[in-house]
């Protein structure tokens, strides 16, 4: 067991206006199961890179611990090889038998280690890399968002696996995963950093109580400052009025005054002025006590949505619907169907079948979640719906060109005519250039678009950057903001919350519950699904 002591660390990227960290100090233990929480762009991944020694910084990070990082960077050349072939280069000193032992705990077959890496699903890649990560002793492990793009089953496997481990920092926005796997939290607040024992829910409960106390204290101080300010003005006015009576008086009206009264009036005025100064000092003290009370409070702004009613109740209907890609074909968009191999998928005349005799209905007012393991056709089904809605009203809907090639369909899929769709794609790789250009291409009101981004906790300085320089969470927020800005009959969201911070997830949950839009969603966040879904549809993978 060792400690990591961070003392007065300051870091900012070259050319950046603001520092990411400013004189931060804290101590953590390498025996902990530490959850790392913070808004997108606050510097979670940056801090992990500081521990790895990738950047120069001011201050001091003192520890005897050695670090390893998930996810490993897999080169293009390695993608074509079996993981066993580049294991030593990926993790020097790693022994394959120990990796196989860890893979068994992760409930993944040993043959996965001996298949070309490119053929592995997201879940298989994640499990193999975690097995490699935990196969070496005496390392403090830096685990950066391990469950993105994983289906519910794979997430559960990773959760159960991490529950039995210790000695790591886990960066995640998945509340269910954090609650199950950590015993301490490291939180990047708006202005400060805190370390606390417990999991996400216990920290959040404490935070809500602390925030409520600080808001009450702030109101108390505001009232006290107001009272003191009013009293000081009143006493000051009395002092000024009294001072003016020192010189000159009417001997008829003020027969009891004489020249010696002047000294008495001066002393009385001085006493009043002294009281004013005492009140001003008290005001300064109250103001200083008030300052900082609200600096770490999360005050998420209520987002707005503009759902539209459609003249039909039944918006989408599928009857014994089937879909298959030509051999070697793909959906082309970071989706699980892209990774289906000829071994895993049923072939029919050279086609890989991803959906078979699928029945489905989506009615107005429903919020339906599609659930199933990677490769069961969730994203493909969404794209089939979008393909039927392409046109002038939905010209902002983006479907990869490769998806439309050599797709074989069967059965019936019907979409209501004139349906306007707001679509959030799971892939952010198409985002590049300035936000201004993005707004112009999508015909978005730039001021409203940026206002939504600000409500999602975007700093103004981000508006001057190119989108390829954004964090993955910030890129997702760009797509979410564009999706929220469009008036639509149906909101189709394909894994919208990958990389998006916990606070923004809560904002989006509140938004949906408030406006009750009709939605078709693919997302594996258990808490999000429990709060939002009116119905969950299970999809089975075709073998």
Image (spheres, helix red, strand yellow):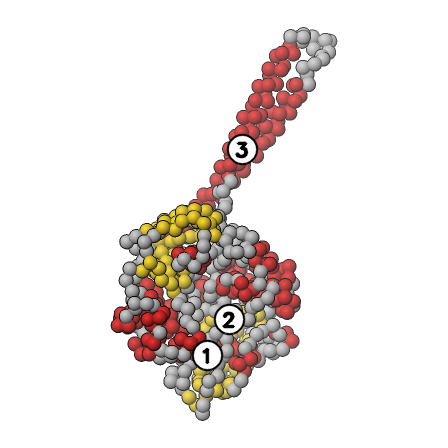
Mark 1 / mark 3, whichever is N-terminal:
3
Q: Marks 3/2: CA distance?
A: 52 Å
Q: Which residue is mark 3?
A: 284
**Measuring 54% from the left and 65% from the top, which residue is drawn there?**
468
**Measuring 45% from the left and 69% from the top, which residue is drawn there?**
523
Secondary structure under tag 3 reads helix
**265 relative to 170, above or below:** above
Q: Which residue is mark 2?
A: 427
Mark 3 / mark 2, whichever is N-terminal:
3
**35 relative to 23, above or below:** below
Mark 1, residues whose alpha carbon is within 10 Å: few (<14), some, or many (≥20)? some
Label 2 near label 3: C-beta < 8 Å?
A: no
Q: Which residue is mark 1?
A: 338
Query: Horizontal and vertical percent for residue 291?
Result: 51, 40
Q: Marks 1/2: CA distance?
A: 13 Å
Secondary structure under tag 1 reads helix
- In this view, the residue farthest toward the bottom is 349
**Residue 496 in view (yes/no):** yes
**Measuring 40% from the left and 75% from the top, which residue is drawn there?**
78
**167 relative to 98, above or below:** above
Lateral position of residue 429 relative to residue 52, left or right: right
Mark 2, residues whose alpha carbon is within 10 Å: few (<14), some, or many (≥20)? some
Rendered-image quadrant of the C terminus: bottom left
**315 relative to 65, above or below:** below
């Amino acid at each position: 067991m060792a400690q990591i002591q961070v003392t007065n660390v300051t870091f900012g990227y070259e050319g950046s206006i603001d520092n990411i960290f400013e004189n931060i100090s804290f101590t953590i233990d390498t025996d902990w199961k530490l959850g790392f929480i913070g808004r997108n762009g606050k510097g979670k991944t940056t801090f992990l890179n500081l521990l790895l020694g990738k950047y120069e910084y001011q201050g001091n990070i003192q520890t005897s611990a050695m670090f390893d990082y998930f996810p490993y960077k897999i080169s293009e050349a390695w993608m074509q090889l079996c993981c066993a072939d580049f294991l030593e280069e990926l993790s020097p000193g790693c022994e394959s038998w120990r990796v196989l032992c860890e893979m068994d705990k992760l409930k993944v077959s040993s043959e996965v280690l001996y298949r070309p890496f490119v053929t592995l699903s997201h879940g298989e890649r994640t499990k193999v890399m975690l097995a490699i990560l935990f196969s070496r002793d005496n390392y403090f492990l830096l685990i950066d968002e391990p469950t993105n793009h994983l289906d519910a089953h794979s997430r559960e496997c990773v959760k159960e696996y991490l529950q039995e481990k210790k000695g790591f920092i886990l960066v995640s926005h998945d509340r269910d995963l954090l609650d199950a796997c950590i015993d301490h939290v490291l939180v990047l607040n708006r202005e400060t950093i805190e370390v606390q024992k417990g999991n996400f829910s216990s920290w959040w409960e404490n935070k809500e109580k602390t925030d409520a106390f600080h808001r009450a204290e702030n109101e108390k101080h505001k009232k006290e400052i107001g009272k003191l300010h009013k009293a000081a003005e009143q006493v000051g006015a009395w002092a000024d009025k009294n001072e003016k009576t020192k010189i000159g008086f009417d001997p008829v009206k003020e027969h009891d005054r004489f020249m010696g009264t002047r000294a008495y009036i001066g002393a009385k005025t001085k006493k009043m002025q002294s009281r004013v100064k005492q009140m001003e000092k008290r005001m300064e003290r109250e103001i200083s006590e008030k300052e900082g009370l609200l600096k770490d409070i999360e005050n998420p702004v209520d987002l707005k949505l503009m759902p539209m009613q459609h003249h039909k109740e039944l918006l989408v209907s599928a009857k014994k619907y089937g879909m298959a890609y030509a051999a070697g074909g793909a959906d082309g968009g970071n989706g699980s169907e892209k990774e289906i191999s000829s071994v895993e998928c049923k072939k029919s005349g050279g086609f890989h079948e991803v959906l078979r005799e699928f029945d489905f209905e989506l009615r107005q007012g429903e919020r339906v979640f599609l659930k199933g393991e990677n490769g069961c056709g969730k994203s493909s089904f969404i794209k089939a719906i979008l393909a039927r809605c392409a046109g002038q009203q939905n010209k902002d809907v983006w479907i990869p060109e490769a998806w439309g090639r050599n797709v074989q369909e069967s059965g019936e899929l019907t979409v209501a005519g004139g349906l306007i769709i707001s679509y959030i794609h799971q892939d952010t790789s198409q985002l590049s250039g300035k936000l201004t250009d993005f707004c112009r291409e999508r015909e978005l009101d730039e001021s409203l678009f940026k206002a939504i981004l600000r409500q999602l906790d975007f700093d103004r300085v981000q508006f001057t950057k190119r989108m390829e320089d954004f964090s993955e969470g910030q890129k997702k927020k760009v797509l979410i903001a564009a999706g929220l800005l469009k008036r639509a009959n149906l909101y189709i969201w394909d894994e919208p919350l990958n990389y998006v911070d916990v606070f923004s997830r809560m904002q989006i949950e509140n938004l949906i519950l408030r406006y009750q839009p009709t939605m078709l969603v693919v997302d594996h966040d258990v808490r999000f699904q429990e709060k939002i879904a009116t119905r969950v549809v299970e999809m089975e993978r075709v073998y």
